[in-house]
Amino acid sequence: MIRLLRSSVFGVLAAWLMLGAVLCADEVLRPVRYEAKLNPYVYKPAWYAWTRTDTVSNQFRSHTVTCMRWHATPEKLPKTEIRYGGQTGFTGLSPFLRLVVNDIPETKILLDDSRFTSWEEGDRRGFEIRMNFDGVFLRLRFYMRPDSPVLWAVLLPEPTSLTPMRRCELTFTALPSKLLKDQADKVLWSGKDVYQRSFQTNERRLTPEQRSTVLTPSETQIVFQDDINDGTGPDRGAGPCLLVLKHDGVAKAVAEPGNGWLSRVKVTLAPEFQAFHFGLFNPPVPIANQDFQRQLESQQPAFTWRGSKD
Amino acid sequence: MKLQLLCAGVLLSASSILAYDLDTKALSPVKHGSTPQHQNLQLVSGKKLQFAIVTDSRGEQHLTGSKARDKSIAPAVQALVKAFEHCTGQTPAVVEAEDAAALERHAYWIVVGDCAVARAQGVDWKAIPEQGFVIKTFPRGVLIVGHDTTLLPERESLSRGTLYGVYDFTERFLGVRYFYPGDIGTHWPQVSDFVVAPANYSDSPRFMNREGGYHLWLGVTKPEDLEKYGTLAGNVKKGDRSFGDPLRFGAKYLGSSHNPRPEDLARAFPDRLKTIFYTTADGKFFYNPKEHLGNLYNVVNLEFADLLIDVWKAAINGDEMIGAIPRKEFIGLGATRKTVTFGNCDTYQSAADIIGDPVVRELNLITPADEARPPNALMANVYARFYQYLCSRLEKELPGANLCILAYYNAEYAPVDPRFQKLPSNLLVNLCNGTVPKYITVPEYREAFQRQVKEWVASTGKPIHRLWLYDEYRNPFVRAVIGEYVGEVPKALGDDLGDGALFFDSGFQFPYYTSFYAAFRSMWNPDWDVEAGIAEHWPLFYGEKAGAYLAEFHRILKHDLMAVYHRLASRRVAIPSYPPALIDRLEELLKLAEAELTPDSIEMRRFRILAMPWADNFKVQRTCNAYQLPVHVATRLLPTETLVVDGDGSDPCWQRARPVRFIDPKGSGQEPRFPVDARLVWDDKGIYGLFKSPYPPVQGKSLWFNSSYEVFFMPGAKAEQNYQFAFDPEGNKYFGKRRYLPLPGPTDPNHKVPGWIQKNTVTNDGWTVEFFIPYAAFEEETPPKAYDTWRFNLVSNRLTPPAEVTGSALTLGNHHNIDMYGRIVFGGLGD
């Protein structure tokens, strides 16, 4: 159902490895590219009324967001989903972003091709989705900067909304590192001996035993990782993924590690929020938890949110 | 096995030696008597006829004018002549039995019907069972004699045994096969030598009534059918029912249907409408002066029974007038000295319309035990009480007459309540169970049907007199083979089914001729091997190679696809989505068969008839397989907007509303020729609709015969009830609902919708209707919130010629096919 748009694995790997070198060497960064496709090839196309992929890429990384509208069936209602590519991390196996506005989930709203537009400002390029939650109008923008491999995003309320926003909650979901199966090839959905999902923020480590923890406003980098499948070897998973949060407009952000196949960070926005910024990053190649931390430290600017005028 | 080979001493052409098997499984089994002792009879030698047809035409001379069509012997002779003409190229002589000199000019005789020759051989037509025949050889020839009441100056019923005997002879001895009307619908083997060995057998039908005349007529009357099929078949005369003879149509007993007709009774007794037609406790009067449908007889009021007795007496006595109208204006009254018939109107009476009846309550005619039975059994005691009274009056007023009742709809089930369970001995039952023959081989349906029949047998003390069998009209894959299941019905019932009739309510259609053929063959003898009978004809009709492909085509229809259909019997799915691979294979087989046929040959013409509808049938299946439930959007009215339901649709909100997409609900895939613009808007009070059709609607009749719309909603995530809103340009309405979950219930046709608003604007340019459905119409259902999804179906019944029915869902001919309903999403503010 989801495909990463990749020029070549080797090319991405090379760029990733060169990220730091390029940034340090003050080389000329190539521009961000954006491409949209309506009804591209997806797995089981018969399941969907329509699908759309929006791909934003630079020389370091490529990100594809897929939006699909599932057909109604006798058993199921039609629904909208927004998914991100990847076998692990922010994965295509489960919607990476859930948005609930005034108790209306994004799966129920009416989305179609006409609500997507390209976007660019300066050297940033990407796309926007105009969403309507029964009169609450929001724009969800995804974009990249030439100097960062992160998929940046911002949620913006529209002043023309017909209904006041009382509540807005986002849930970021990731599958850290690996999805395990038993000897009978059945998926293991949870288990203390199986998954040790933890979070490493820029301030502290949140262990699996901590069911949910409120993040502080200074915790802007939240790494989803697994302590067993820590990416240190071929059978130890792909390693961590990163969520960058800017807490302006955030009423509460809660991290939920645990022992399940998915980990979540739930963000509740203040009704009066002006803009909510975040970023997502799946490393393109397996990387150990510690190595990723070193990468974040050594290339901090690339993984830090920056305003357009900064 | 009575396979007759040629005598060694006779010189014959080997390529046209006619070998026959009297016990061929392709034909009905017959009863053999003791074999006569004599030489074989060389009736045809070297293409030369060695015989004459012998008959006594005096016996039927009294049948003149319109009565001439009842003859048996005369048409039997013609049929025999025709058969030999086709098979040998020679026309046999026909000789009167009394003409001794003429008789002696021929070596052999084929004696047709009662005559001195037959009687001299000891064959007495009156001793043959009714509608039966005897075929017996003797040294000089063959006797074909049947029970022919046409020989009587006065007869109680029509029996044409000789006619059937001749057709049997041509089939069994000559190898003729009669499948459908026209030049090419019969297989005529080419015969140059024909030897008949000594034989003696008889046959008679299992069912005295094999009523196919009307249904055959249906298939040879419409101009489009005659053009498509009649041209290919050759020499098909419009409205011609004569092919019923080789199919052995016949009738001993009076037919039974919804009689008397309500419109006739209403005209005859205009001052007694309240006696005839039912009024509910709350005053709803079920009399529809405009149409046949929509009426309910007042079976609670025994005065209506008295009126019926008067009508029947007047009819039987030959009174000129019955009530206010001439007796001749009563259509299909169904009244003779032996039988009178009564059938409830073709309208379903809902529980709500009878439960509160004062007589029903006072006499406790509907008990909790009745409510626990199937819905159609609810009024069993009500009808039983009526029949008990009617039969007692009949016994006094018309002694010797039976009452044949139509066990249909609310009268379908026998009473089991001890007060009413024993029905009078002068009552006969014509049972209409909608599940046969299509589900007769599905065990749970078969058993339920058997139980139902046993209840009637226990109640009346006698077998069921007649059965009304139903086709699956909407599904051509079933239509093509359903007649082959007719024979299973009497096998399932045994002695619980009398000899009255299997009335197969299925119109003849040329491409599905094998089904029609099989049905009537089975009515004659249910033990006929239907598989063998159909299998035999493929190579005969289409040649060996093409026939083999068509045999497989038929096998897939009869076995593989019917298995799919039967697996869905519990949900009564009329048109399943069949496996695409099987549809592809059917299509391939037709192509393979066609490739083996010579253009312009008789076989190719037959093939064209058979193959004609299948491209469209396959297309519907492919449309079904590709079908995705459509999702429509109801636009939300903004708080700043107003909507006035005034019939002109000028409110700005309608511009924002999205039109509903219409399709052909039967699956042709073709775009509607006459588009309708239909939009829905909603707010927290209810649902608004604006429908515009750019053509003048049909008006002046009742709802179902005017142009109309039908809107269906199944609210909520569980979709437990289906609500139907039907309306026409004159404000006629029908509101119904039916529960499906948690337990299915019957349809309530009297659903109340307080607050319904409908405004029409009708001009020469079209019909615009605005309507409003308050949420109160959906009873305890929660009004929708933004982005809630309901099931939805919208139907436009354009009756202005050319008529076109379009809809928003692929419901395949059944607007209540809820599995195929689309979805309506209640859009949010600003969507």
Image (spheres, coloured by chain):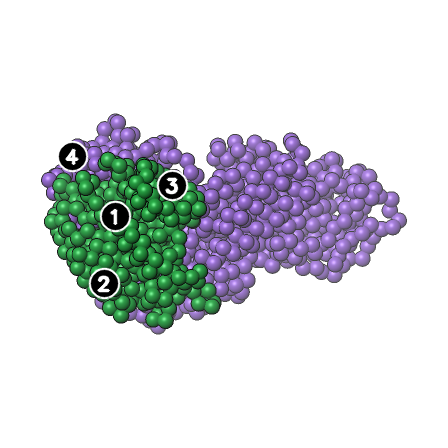
Residue located farthest toward the bottom when viewing the structure as drawn:
B418
Q: Quadrant of the N terminus of chain B?
A: bottom right
Q: Quadrant of the C terminus of chain B?
A: top left
Residue B590: x and y, percent?
A: 59, 41
Does dot 1 land on a helix, a strand or a loop?
helix
Q: Which residue is mark 1?
A: A301
Find the distance from the CA under tag 2 to the CA under tag 3: 43 Å
Q: B487 and B547: which one is in front? A: B547
Does dot 4 land on a helix, a strand or a loop?
loop
- Say which quarter of the image contains residue A211: bottom left
Residue B122: x and y, percent?
A: 72, 56
Labels 3 and 4 share a subunit: no
Find the distance from the CA under tag 4 to the CA under tag 1: 56 Å
Local crowd size for mark 2, using a 10 Å CA cut-off: few (<14), some (14–19), many (≥20): few
Q: Which residue is mark 3?
A: A39
Does dot 3 land on a helix, a strand or a loop?
loop
Q: B334 and A94: which one is in front? A: A94
